[in-house]
Structure formats: structure tokens, C-alpha cells
Amino acid sequence: FKQDAIKARYKNWPDLIAYCRLSAAPVGRFMIDLHGGSRRGYGASDALCIALQLINHLQDCGEDYRTLDRVYLPQDWLAEAGADIEGLAGKSASGALRQVFDWTLLGVNQLLADAESLPGGLYSSRLALESAVIIRIAQALSRRLGKGDPLANRIELSKSELALCSLQGIMAGALARW
């Protein structure tokens, strides 16, 4: 929380991930501990929580910049792509910002792949099924962010897409338990 109050920019991907490890990962660890633990430790949970936070940062990148002057995109990637931070205040993403969004989504998708083992390692069947659903929702949001422009429109899933992700997640979670 202190970091949010004093730091508004992240110089590179490791710097951004370090922030997420402090802000997002503890939530998943707490849930695992609350529900009996995991046979495989916290790695997959950390990956999922970090991916979810990054997805949220992409969904809200324009608003975060306009209202809080916070940019949760690696500064070195913005520079490499030739993107201006001020472009986050626009009504649509430039090609350069789109490139940074896509690089971020590559990282998100790797984290989501790392999270796939989470449901099978949890002692709680309920939390395993819930985490499998959350993974499917995150994957669908990542795909949607890859095709959409979070500066132009709020990127979210419809009720039917959420229902489909839930069914897929429950099936995947159940299979991971056997």
C-alpha cells in the first residue's frame, strides 16, 4: 500500500512483477492458507494472482493514468515501442501502445500457463473448482484484451461468456482432481 502511495511508474517488467508480488500474490496465499493449503506451494497461485492484477491494469490503464497518474506498463517497453504515456489519456490506443499491451499480454499468458497446475494441487475441492473457473475467465479476458482496445471500451465478458468459462472451469477443475 505504501508503494501505491509513492510510486506511479515501473521501469521494466521485473519491477512491475515485483510490485504485483507484494500487492496481488498475498491475496492468493491467504486464500490457500484459509482453505487448507496446497500440495505444490504457492507458485501457481502467485502466477494467477499476478496475471489477474495485470489484466486489471490493462483494463483500467486509461482511467488509472487520467485519474491517478499511475502507469502500470513497463517504462522501457513504452520507450522501445515509441509510445507516449500521454497516449493513455486518449480515446484509442496508438499502434505503439497496442504493441506494449501485446507484450504485456504475452507475460500474462505465460503466467496463466504457470497457473494451470493450481487446481490440482489444492486440498480444498471447492477452492480448486473456483480457481479453475477464475483461470478460464482470465484466459478469456486476455484473449479479449488482445483483440480490443481498453482505451476505447471497457474490456469485459458477457454473462454468457462468464457462464461458459464457469462450465469449462468446473470441468477442468474436476478433471485436475482425479
Image (cartoon, helix red, strand yellow):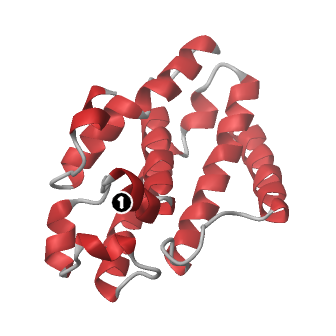
The one of 71 and 21 positioned closer to us in this rendering: 71
Q: Position of residue 177 (x, y in %)?
A: 71, 33
Asked if residue 15 is positioned above or below residue 61 in the image, the reply reads above
Q: Is residue 40 visible?
A: no
* Quarter-of-image position of residue 92: bottom left
* Quarter-of-image position of residue 23: top left
Q: Position of residue 84 (x, y in %)?
A: 22, 76
Question: What kind of residue is marked 1?
Answer: Tyr
The residue lying furthest to the front in this view is 67
The one of 178 and 154 positioned closer to us in this rendering: 154
Q: Residue at x 79, y 50 (%)?
A: 166
Q: Position of residue 168 (x, y in %)?
A: 77, 54
Q: Tell whether 92 sits left or right of 160.
A: left
Q: Secondary structure at mark 1?
A: helix
Identify the image quadrant of the N terminus: top left
Asked if residue 159 is positioned above or below residue 128 in the image, the reply reads below
Asked if residue 38 is positioned above or below residue 81 in the image, the reply reads above
Q: Tell whether 145 sits left or right of 17.
A: right
Asked if residue 27 is positioned above or below residue 109 in the image, the reply reads above
Q: Residue at x 37, y 79 (%)?
A: 98
Q: Is residue 85 visible?
A: yes
Q: Which residue is mark 1?
A: 65
Identify the image quadrant of the C terminus: top right
Q: Residue at x 74, y 48 (%)?
A: 169
* Quarter-of-image position of residue 110: bottom left
Q: Position of residue 4 (x, y in %)?
A: 31, 36
